Image: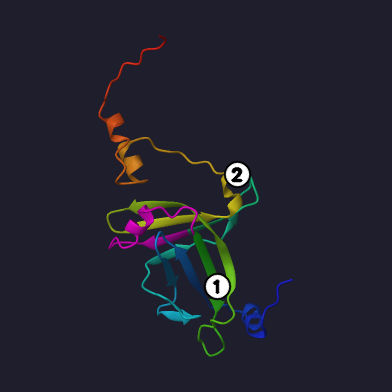
Amino acid sequence: MRVFSSTLLAALNSDTLKHFALIDIQLASTTVYFTDLPYPVTVGGITYTSDSGLVEYQAPRQSSQVDREAFKLTLVDNDNTLRPQLEQGIAGKTLRVRIGVFNGSDQPNTTDLLTSYQGYIDSVNYQNNFEQALIVIEASSPMADLSLVKTLITSKSGMDQLSLTDTSFDSVIDKNESIVRWGR
């Protein structure tokens, strides 16, 4: 059974709960640390930045097909700082989200943190609506692949979402013809 501190129990049992999130995202060559607080906070010697462009994080949901948790995180990346790291491939890297509460003096309690989600990054999608460049990271538990269904868009633009440097699909688009002779 999970044991909570008296400070955390008091906050959870109060009428209003003021909380914050700490998010660790492992990228290709580094780990980034974000918070939804309006100011940076240091926890265990690690500084969580507040200017991360964090738009939303959805609570883990359960799939009806297989008992799996899925977690979605949306970040703004207008200055294109995260995208190069993400294009190096972060599938299978770790994502951890911890939730903290504010203490009685309205300060973030960084000693009693609840792990809301810990799993692996499953997919990254880029969305650009001409006002914001959004990165949507979906993470899931190790059981995620059992019910995973993805549609692969087979167009040049669709392949560019996976990799801008991969040109293997370009020859398919250029209407190249080849004759295949069957038999001897």
The residue beneath circle 1 is: 99
* Badge 1 amino acid: Ile
Quadrant of res 41: bottom left
Taking the image as shown, residue 90 lies to the left or right of residue 133, namely right
Is-magenta flag for residue 82? yes
Taking the image as shown, residue 143 lies to the left or right of residue 161, namely right
Where is 10 relative to 124, above or below?
below
Q: Earlier in the sequence, mark 1 or mark 2?
A: 1
Crowd class of label 1 (few under 14; some 14 to 19; many from 20; radius 10 Å): some
Which residue is nearer to you in this view: 35 or 167?
167
**x, y percentage for residue 28?**
40, 59
Q: Residue at x 62, y 52 (%)?
A: 68
Q: Residue at x 45, y 63 (%)?
A: 26
Where is 41 relative to 162, above or below?
below
Which residue is nearer to you in this view: 119 or 28?
28
Where is 70 relative to 35, above or below?
above
Residue at disc 1, secondary structure: strand
Q: Residue at x 56, y 86 (%)?
A: 103
Residue at disc 2, secondary structure: helix
Task: Count the labels in the image.
Answer: 2
Magenta residues span 73-93
**x, y percentage for residue 84?**
32, 57
**x, y percentage for residue 88?**
37, 53
The residue beneath circle 2 is: 146
The furthest residue to the bottom: 105
